[in-house]
Amino acid sequence: MKPDETILKPVGPIIYYDLPFEELTPVEGNIFEYLRDFNCVFTDNGRAAMRLVGEYLGSGEILMSDYSCLSVAFGFQSPLKIVNYPIKDDYSPDLEAIERLITKDTRLICVNQFCGRLLDPETVDGLLRLKEKYGLLLLEDATQSIMSSPQTFGDFCTSSLYKWFPCVSGGVLYSRKPLPAEIKNRKLRVRAPHKRAYAMVLKALQVKGILDRQDLADPMFDQFEDDNREEALLPIAGMPALDRFLLTCFNVENARRKRTDNAISLSRMIRYDTGIIRPVYDRLPDEADCLLCYPIRVSDKARRDALKAHLEENGIYAPGYWHLEPPFGSYPESVALSEKVLCLPIDQRYNEEDMRRVADVINHWQEKNV
């Protein structure tokens, strides 16, 4: 591999670190300024932010999408009980099913906006009606949607910021309303940097062709995900100073513009006339969307897995959000959706030429597999 060869890497947890420290400087329009109108608590990650809400609630039932990442469940520990609700074919919450699941013990409804596409106004109004009718709280898991809009309906919002920027960790709990004193006044300790920082640097060296070994970083990232399970048993941690500094060095609007341009370009380049691939959403991305990644739906699991492998063979890594693990995946609709989706990289490191490369690999594969 040549040091200057471009390789696309996955959006999400594995964003490798390749920024020269001497070029880093705080900029205007960073994430802290983006959230300046909110009351915020910055944490080690998004799970920690959710744990603040969970520990504030103490007990009761949490209604949560059956189509969720396992790490979300770590935010709500016993005696809280997670009750799953089904989603529709467009990944939006099934409001009628949610209302049937509400009991006297229900405290909160947790909703995510898949890949950053905001829920339609009718669905948002429906959630607000349920909140008022039953006296509930709404938690907006904004990890995937914070750049489309920091808040659309949540009493509380949470986000994992390291999914968007090349920092080691970083999460946030925020609200337009004053945060409860039990959350606002809580003292959070800061942990020492973990092995993920080392893995991010190793990944950058591999991508640049400086390090020949290709089997070092990925196992560390896998171990990091395993550590998440143990982390749920540790005290909630605050955001490390390194990540606070790194997050001041990225302009949110620049990232939003590049991601939006990439999503629009990619959506126009991919062929949807073969019967193999179709968009996840009814309308293609536009200037209003800032997606975490660009999702596509493949006709069946076997073809989805084959396309994913083909992309990896060409240096393009497209995760499937999500591989469902208990307590999620209770409804067959959730499992069916999870087995067909691929999420394509569109983040701010890439440009239209990179999107052309992704589309060409996908389109050529479709031509051979019609």
Image: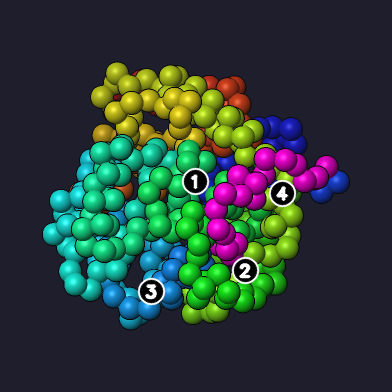
Q: Which mark is residue 150?
A: 1
Q: Looking at the image, is 152 positioned above or below residue 39?
A: above
**Do tag 2 and tag 1 residues touch (Cβ < 8 Å)?**
no
Nearer-N-terminus badge (4/1)? 1
Q: Which residues are magenta?
A: 23-46
According to the picture, the residue beneath numbered tag 4 turns out to be: 248
The foreground one among 185 and 173 is 185
Q: Does the segment drawn in magenta span residue 29?
A: yes
Front: mark 4 or 1: 1
Q: How far apart in space, not on screen, are marks 1 and 3 (Cα)?
A: 23 Å
Q: How far apart in space, not on screen, are marks 4 and 1 (Cα)?
A: 17 Å
Residue type of the residue flagged with mark 3: Leu
Residues packed near mark 4 inside 10 Å, few (<14), some (14 to 19) or many (20 plus): some
**Do tag 4 and tag 1 residues touch (Cβ < 8 Å)?**
no
Residue 352 placement (x, y as % from top left) = 58, 22
- Give the quarter of the image for residue 256: top right
Q: How far apart in space, not on screen, are marks 2 and 1 (Cα)?
A: 20 Å
Q: How far apart in space, not on screen, are marks 3 and 2 (Cα)?
A: 20 Å
According to the picture, the residue beneath numbered tag 3 turns out to be: 57
Residue 42 placement (x, y as % from top left) = 60, 62
Judge left or right: residue 299 versus residue 242. Answer: left
Nearer-N-terminus badge (2/4)? 2
Please tell me whether mark 1 sits on a helix, a strand or a loop. Answer: loop
